[in-house]
Image (cartoon, rainbow, N blue to C red):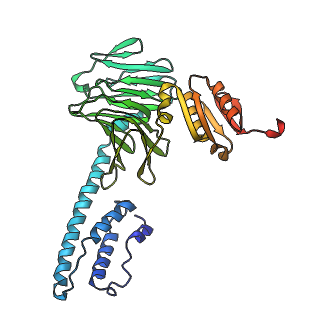
């Protein structure tokens, strides 16, 4: 922890004797606390730990008991620190050392490709043709569009990890062995096991996907992302968790889900529940999730081939279209990106038609160069 972070701790004064024994004890505790290795805890975690320590300082007025009480206090502080540091930091070290196999598998798979790829646990890679592909797990085979592929899963690969990689400009749907159906948007990676282990179903997502989870009360369904996990039994929801976005969001359409955010924190993360018609946005900087009521169609319409915008900044609209069509969409003026757009865009239209619709509805004009559109403010003088 940096030196300036210590100033966040309560100020007990430079003179430990000027405010009585309680102040002196706190002063000594503070000096000991500041001596902890700086890299072990974040500012927020150190604040929480300090507040817990302060809660233990209750010294009686009887001066004859002060010394023994302070001795007991220090034993208690030592015990608290030993538990928090050994368990909390030990958990962190173990977690990061072991790594997350699903996350590692997602990071290995690149979305910079011209075709959707199904990477199987037995090292086979199958290229999926077309802009929209469909993968269905059925007993001993995998049905891919109009063809079938043998699962060919050996006992050693029974719980091996498969990865479906959907590049920019493509979409895909996949139905897992339990009947859960998932719509994957452009630039997404889904990691899942060949078969789910007993008692739990778990997948990892980098990108955007809509989930229709098959209900199974005996086996909760978990969706992992880089910073937020979701637990469900059977419901429908959308997750947007692109690696290059600053925020991760979840939109619930049916049922209920439980969010785990700040999952790598010293205290084990924060849990919150969502109800239908709400959206949770997790900010990686503040480590907080904000939940609010929304029109869910605005966030899930992409799976049905539409983009609904309601006073949405143009830079957000362009980012979505860029991923969907795999075209660069560049705004020369950042202020233009803050202009808002409302309306429904048909994603079945080709990109040229889409750009014409956008420029007609806004104050923009554009130039096209290969797979890039460059936007700027309309020159009203020439009109």
- Above or below, 356 relative to 342: above
- Point out residue 174 in the picture as x, y percentages from the top left corner: 38, 23
Query: Is there any visible trace of residue 180 in the rendered image?
Result: yes
User: Image quadrant of residue 89?
Assistant: bottom left
Figure disc tally: 0
- Point out residue 209 in the picture as x, y percentages from the top left corner: 43, 32
In the rendered view, does 370 fall on the left or right side of 121? right
In the rendered view, does 382 fall on the left or right side of 315? right
Residue at figure coordinates x 36%, y 31% from the top left: 191
Q: Nearer the viewer, residue 45 or 180?
A: 180
Residue at figure coordinates x 17%, y 75% from the top left: 72
The image quadrant where one finds the N terminus is bottom left
- Point out residue 350 in the picture as x, y percentages from the top left corner: 61, 23
Query: Is there any visible trace of residue 110 in the rendered image?
Result: no
Q: Nearer the viewer, residue 59 or 149?
A: 59
Q: Nearer the viewer, residue 34 or 347?
A: 347
Residue at figure coordinates x 26%, y 60% from the top left: 85
The image quadrant where one finds the C terminus is top right
- Above or below, 289 relative to 59: above
Residue at figure coordinates x 37%, y 73% from the top left: 10
User: Image quadrant of residue 237?
Assistant: top left
- Point out residue 17 in the picture as x, y percentages from the top left corner: 32, 87
User: Image quadrant of residue 179?
Assistant: top left
* Extreme residue in the right direction: 382
């Amino acid at each position: 922890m940096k030196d300036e972070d210590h100033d966040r701790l309560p100020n007990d004064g430079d003179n430990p004797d000027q405010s009585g024994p309680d102040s002196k004890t706190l002063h000594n505790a503070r000096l000991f606390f500041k001596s902890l290795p700086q890299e072990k805890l974040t500012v927020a975690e150190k604040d929480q730990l300090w507040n817990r320590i302060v809660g233990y300082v209750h010294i009686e007025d009887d001066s004859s008991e002060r010394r023994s009480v302070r001795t007991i206090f220090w034993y208690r502080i030592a015990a608290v620190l030993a538990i928090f540091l050994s368990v909390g930091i030990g958990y962190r070290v173990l977690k990061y050392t072991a790594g997350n196999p699903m996350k590692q598998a997602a990071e290995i798979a690149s979305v910079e490709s011209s075709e959707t790829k199904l990477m199987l646990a037995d090292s086979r890679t199958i290229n999926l043709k077309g802009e929209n592909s469909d993968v269905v797990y059925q007993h001993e085979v995998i049905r891919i569009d109009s063809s079938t592929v043998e699962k060919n899963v050996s006992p050693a690969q029974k719980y091996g990890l498969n990865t479906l990689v959907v590049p920019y400009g493509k979409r895909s749907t996949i139905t897992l062995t339990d009947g859960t159906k998932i719509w994957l948007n452009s630039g997404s990676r889904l990691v899942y096991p060949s078969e789910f282990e007993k008692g739990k179903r778990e997948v990892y997502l980098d990108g955007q996907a809509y989930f229709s989870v098959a209900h199974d009360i005996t086996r909760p369904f978990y969706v992992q992302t880089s910073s937020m996990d979701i637990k469900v039994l059977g419901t429908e929801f959308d997750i947007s968790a692109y690696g290059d976005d600053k925020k991760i969001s979840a939109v619930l359409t049916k049922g209920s889900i439980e969010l785990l955010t700040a999952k790598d924190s010293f205290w084990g993360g924060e849990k919150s529940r969502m109800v239908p018609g709400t959206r949770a946005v997790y900010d990686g900087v503040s480590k907080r999730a904000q939940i609010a009521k929304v029109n869910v169609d605005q966030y899930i319409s992409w799976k049905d081939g539409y983009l609904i915008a309601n006073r949405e900044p143009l830079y957000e609209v362009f980012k979505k279209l860029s991923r969907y069509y795999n075209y660069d969409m560049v705004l020369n003026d950042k202020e233009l990106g803050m202009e808002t757009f409302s309306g429904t865009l048909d994603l079945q239209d080709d990109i040229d038609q889409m750009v014409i619709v956008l420029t007609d509805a806004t104050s923009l004009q554009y130039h096209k160069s290969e797979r890039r559109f460059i936007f700027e403010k309309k020159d009203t003088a020439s009109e």
